[in-house]
Amino acid sequence: MEVRHLAVFLAVAEERNFTRASIRLHTTQSAVSATIQSLEAELGAELFDRSARQIQVTVAGLALIPKARAVLDAVVEARDCVDAVTGGVTGTVSVGFMTSVTLVDTPRLLGEFAEANPEVRVVLRSSERGSSGLVDMLSSGEVDIAFIANLAQPSADVRLMELDSTPLLLAVTTAHRLASRGSIGLRELAGERFIDFPLGYGNRSIIDRAFADAGLDRDVRFETADIAHAAALVKNGLGVAFLPAFLVASEPSLRTLTVQGEDLKLTVSVAISHSRRPSRAAQLLWDLAQNARKPT
Amino acid sequence: MEVRHLAVFLAVAEERNFTRASIRLHTTQSAVSATIQSLEAELGAELFDRSARQIQVTVAGLALIPKARAVLDAVVEARDCVDAVTGGVTGTVSVGFMTSVTLVDTPRLLGEFAEANPEVRVVLRSSERGSSGLVDMLSSGEVDIAFIANLAQPSADVRLMELDSTPLLLAVTTAHRLASRGSIGLRELAGERFIDFPLGYGNRSIIDRAFADAGLDRDVRFETADIAHAAALVKNGLGVAFLPAFLVASEPSLRTLTVQGEDLKLTVSVAISHSRRPSRAAQLLWDLAQNARKPT
DNA sequence: TGAAAACAATCGCCATATGCGATGATTCAA
DNA sequence: TTGAATCATCGCATATGGCGATTGTTTTCA
């Protein structure tokens, strides 16, 4: 009987639903199912009655609930007491991030982290080369953890956790020939001038990939790493751009179009190196990000 | 942080020695080493100071000890409370065993088990075909758990745990031509008449294997499944036999010889089926056997 | 002071556990 | 009776843990 088993058990007992428990635990329903089964086998008792639509906690399960909580509490205490002795977490975390993506509220996240771990020095770093640059910095140890957008080629050495995603919409001026269209095929965009991020940025790579997969070329006339700047260029009629929905939703001077048959999304993830052991501080920041994550 | 980590930590803290802790935990030193390292990494603190010959528990480790105990206690409570609700363990265990091998005190083991689990009905079974028969009974589900001696061909479906082993010595009468020898080569035994177990018995298969490997034939003149009977036959000059050391050590009418260059041992193991989930009762009996095991 | 012993760390390999996505079976409501 | 909700099961990929062998360091003993 491991701590993990009991944590899953409690989640199911509280939600009275395997699927919701799996969402809360950021895992899958099948994993929850398997865990409960192995716990039941080990204890030699059914913990839930699944015969009805709404699962019922059995008598054995009810008895276990407070004891399981006691175990988890004891574990938290164990961890805390070590932290107390070592004077809490110290050291330095180096955090790679992207300036212009406000989809995930990294400032708030870092604020919470700093408050909880006042002894940790936080160093913010960014990269000229967007997400792929940040990944390289992770591998080289230049940063301990990074917030990145979609990767063209997921590196094997990087452990990713998706935090949130937003659709990428094609933004055009109100005067544009496509302004009145609600959606459009990639093929019809062949002649457009595009504004986009420099190569290496997650945003850029998804669009490049979509065009390449469709066997199409694209004329990227302007490149900028500043997303607000990109929006301003579109407004001034210098071209069209794929921009995150949250940025263009409330812009009266822009119209947005979805792309038919493509699922263009900007996804923000946290990333740590797979090969390097994360420092305690980096681990805590990862955990914090996990809690801030939108349930799948 | 899992229960297992804390259990290993406590063992090391109490033994103040990784190697001894590994013996107590029935695992290897390298596994203990790895576990402690991962726990230290997770907590972000050193728990032991290994710079000196005698390891020291650090301040952080000292603080953790009582908390770790609290976690383990809470886990035991959790398990007990479920057992209490389900009215303890019930059902039937079917135990396969070998009558004549007293190397492991199975009666005492079963006595302890029966006392701890009064509601469990224990059915004892044995096999005409020794250990290999017991293995077949395991696979077919005829028995839930079995105590067996060395297997000629370890079955993939059987999970084994060694309990104890004893050297097999060649027993001869005091009048025998080899009585004054302390040891002997297999080759010199070519002309002897042997008394041994029937085919299928662990005892028999090790000796057969040793002779076969050496390219030698052997004349097994008498077969008996009763080990005491075999000893009696030897005493009466009907032949020689390989018998467990504990049986022949105190026999004034017998002399014993070791075999040069061979490590002939009778090993007693518990076995359960690998494919069938053990019942709770079978699991408890397995655990009990593990505790009774001689440290490796 | 040199050899041996004690002991933890590390490495390569393998088995098991866990996680995931897809699919199947069951229940229940419309 | 159909469809939505929900848990179980299956096959596969990966991570974790365990083992045995080896290495390197410290300590002890001759």
Image (cartoon, coloured by chain):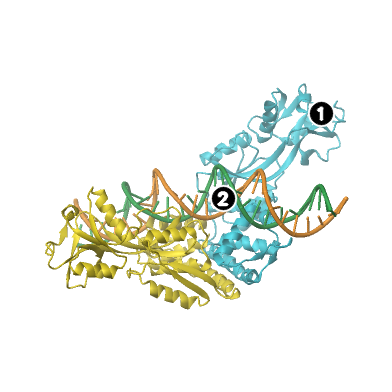
Chain colours: A yellow, B cyan, C green, D orange
Residue B239 % position (x, y): 78, 26
Rendered location of residue D11, percent (x, y) = 39, 43
Nearest the eye: B34 or A130? A130
Q: Chain for mark 2?
A: B
Q: Indicate the chain on which mark 1 is placed.
A: B
Camera-nearest label, 2 or 1:
2
Where, by quadrant of the figure, is residue B250 drawn? top right
Mark 2 / mark 1, whichever is N-terminal: 1
Residue B208 falls in which quadrant of the image?
A: top right
Q: Residues within 10 Å of mark 1 (few under 14, many from 20)?
A: few
Give coordinates of residue A270: x percent, y percent: 41, 63
Quadrant occupied by the N terminus of chain B: bottom right
Question: Which residue: 69% across, 23% down?
Answer: B215
Can marks 2 and 1 be said to lie on one chain? Answer: yes
Dot 2 falls on a residue whose secondary structure is helix
The dot on residue B236 is 1
| Residue B242: % across, % down | 75, 33
Question: Tag 1: residue type?
Answer: Asn
Q: Give the vertical position of A48 relative to A104 (above or below).
A: above
Marks 2 and 1: CB-CB under 8 Å? no
Circle 1 sits in a helix, a strand or a loop, which is it? loop
Front residue of A176 and B110: A176
- Left or right of B142 on screen, residue B115: right
C-alpha distance separating marks 2 and 1: 42 Å
Q: Using the rendered image of the protein, determine whether residue B173 is visible from the camera's viewpoint.
A: yes
Crowd class of label 2 (few under 14; some 14 to 19; many from 20; radius 10 Å): many
- In the figure, A272 relative to B60: above or below? above
Which quarter of the figure has residue B150? top right
Residue of label 2: B282
Q: Amino acid at mark 2?
A: Ala
